[in-house]
Amino acid sequence: MITLALILAAFIVMSLGMDKHHRVFFDGGLSKPKRSALKGCAWLILCFAFVVCCKIHGPQFGPVWFAGIATVAAFMTMGLVSLRTTISKKAR
Amino acid sequence: MAKVQTVPRAEIISRTILGVFGSYLLASAALIAITRLWPEGGRTAVSLGEMTGFALFGLAAIMAFSMRNVRMAWLLIVGGAAVLLAIGFGLGSAGGQP
Amino acid sequence: MKGGIRQSNSWLHGWAGLLLGWVMFAIFFTGTIAFFRHEVTFWMQPELHRTTAVGHEEAAKVAIERLEAIAPQAREWGVVLPSERNPTLRISWDDAGADPDNPASAPADRLLRDRAEKQAEITNARGGRPRDPGLLLDPATGDVLTPRDTAGGEFLYRFHYRLHGLPNELGRWIIGLATFAMFIAIISGIITHKKIFTDFFTFRAGKGQRSWLDGHNAMAVLSLPFHLMITFSGLLLLGSTLLPWSGGGGHGHGGHGRAGNDEIVAASGTAPEQDRIASDRIIAEGQSIWGAPAGRMIFHRVNGVTQTVELTSQKNDDLTLRPGGGPGRTITFDAKNAEVVERTDTEAENAIAATDRTMVALHLGRFAPWQFRWLLFVAGVAGTLMIATGLVLWSVKRKEKRRGAPGTVGHRLVDSLNIAAITGLPLATAAYFWASRIISAASPDRANLEISIFFAVWLGSFIHALFRPDGKAWLEQLIASGLGFASLAVLNPLSGGMDLVTATSRGNWIVAGFDLTVLVTGAVFLLAANLLAARATRNSSAQPRPSNTAAATELAREAP
């Protein structure tokens, strides 16, 4: 659960760091330093999540769980992000 | 597909044969070479051989369709398989097999 | 195919994906269900729904008592203890060499034994690993359970790796070819759609071909680790078939229990077995050594007296243990004083074997606790949808290119095959589950009848798809599948199963989980049908077009 929350957070930050997605959330593009800051931040959270996951499930099952949870988190992120797209479209 | 017309049919056939049979040949050659060369042989050698073989299969299949020069692709894949087989039969003496 | 690595890979991706795409879809679909094959079998046998698991020690006592009554002279007894995946208690015996008309058995027990032996013959004739004759018991009461004969989830599992009704090697080869194609399709897909990594979480609904592509990409990329793992390990599992040059040095599967230890001097006695065998201490000792639950016991016996007990863990707690042929930890105990005679852990000897085993273990998922099993299931669903969207994409692309012109015979065939695979197979599966409840429990050869119904419905869906216009065929089959799945949850309590509310309140998550899953699956199919129908009407009123292409392109616009 903790891992899921962490990875989800990481992916959302990561999506904010991607130009196209960023535009959906905020008007206007994304400056280079801001993008790298967001992406860096996302990777940091991901790494942290990996360590936490390995602590919880042990060195052997940790990575396996991590990959599994990351998959689910990615689908959730996709749902959230594309949901935002439709909402923002309707708002306009 | 519409794009097909831009490449001669013969080349597509050649690449397909290479991609399917050439890759399989390479994978088999890798397995044979590894099982013959591995000192104790047995299960470990088979595992390693299969893993390497399948990885090479993927690589070769992509190469067969991606490389600009068809002849070069043929040379690399079939040649690679021949070299592996030669090494396997030359240096390995059915070493590990139980 | 023309110059450029991306184009040629796109070409390769399209054709490698299409040619064996239907087989791949079937493999993924049945394989995904197979992660829950024991649960599926359990659901298909409503006679078992009301059993409740008890502690291992208690269950072992019940089993020993029964076995002594039924097969006192057997040289080997087997017991499968209740687990979270199956709360029943299975006992089995190997009677080789024993006097068949043992006077020690009561007539009722002898009747049970004969029936079990006949049943074992039928089951073993269906294939799979041969099993000793056995019985299922309610572990709480010790009553003999008589579930209906069914191939259950085992059928879908076996279909997943060797199809059905074909010689073993041929079936494996077809699956293997599809796996090769899948492997290539994945690699070339990554090369083709390199951009997917930059708009990672994109899904644009309602944009025709674009949406299908987004859906396809999302399903592929977001669970890419799973796809790579499952495909590569799939190749490894079929390794000895696909690359038969290793001199028969088989791989992965096929472990079986050791024969009895002959060196031990035969103990003897007249006390009943349940007093003689220290089963409580054996189980407790084994579980404390492993730190993991016990799963099976094998009693090695001489002259009707158990000498040693082989205890096996319930499931692997380590990815490098032998992944197939039963859990990889075994301890042999002296039956009387629970002393450890021998301990075997099938750990991998080196890094190569460990890598191989980890892959295979992940593929089979036998180690998985239920939470992880669901993750595998979800990833499997993603893979199934990836193939489905890929297949549809292939025909949508050509349809948009044709702009409403009727397709060639080839296109038509592809469309029909798509329908028969994507909606026909789920429909056939729903019919298979229905069959398990409709066919009378006592009817002879019912397991094969269930399988025949599965194939009949599947074939029917293909014929239906050939003769109905595209859009109608999709719609009708989606509705049929949706109703077929959703109604299973209603059918279940009506045909002797435990209803969803009771199952949930009693914590019977095998039955409840199955019912909830079919409800969700049914709802998704009906939702898809609804979207498709809505699109079709909106469009036909806006601009009349030949209905078949219109509806099919409409389907193309919908989210998967």
Image (cartoon, rainbow, N blue to C red):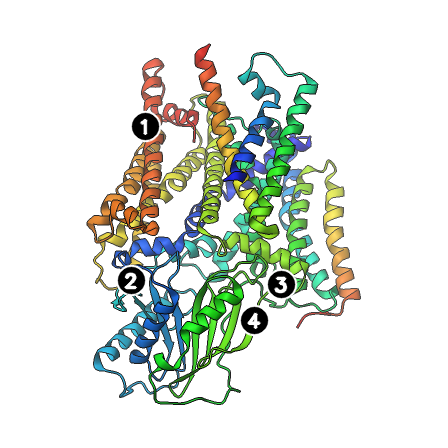
Residue ID at (66%, 49%) = B55
* Residue assigned mark 1: C530
Q: Secondary structure at mark 3?
A: loop
Q: Hey, what amino acid is under mark 3?
A: Ala
- Position of residue C347 in the picture relative to residue C370 (left or right): right
Chain ID of residue with mark 2: C
Label of residue C149 in the image = 2
Residue ID at (55%, 76%) = C342
Chain ID of residue with mark 4: C
Q: In the rendering, at what x and y percent does residue C190 appear? A: 61, 36
How would you rate the neighbour count of disc 2 (Cα within 10 Å): few for under 14, some for 14-19, many for 20 or more? many
- Mark with earlier residue (1, 3): 3
Name which quarter of the figure residue C411 lies in. top left
- Position of residue C440 in the picture relative to residue B82 (left or right): left
How far apart are labels 4 and 2 at the CA level? 35 Å
Q: Residue furthest top?
A: A92
* Residue assigned mark 3: C348
Residue ID at (23%, 82%) = C106
Q: Quadrant of the C terminus of chain B?
A: bottom right
Q: Secondary structure at mark 2?
A: loop
How far apart are labels 1 and 4 at the CA level? 56 Å
- Do marks 4 and 3 share a subunit? yes
- Position of residue C481 in the picture relative to residue C240 (left or right): left
Chain ID of residue with mark 1: C
* Residue assigned mark 4: C344
**C104 w.r.t. C359: above or below:** below
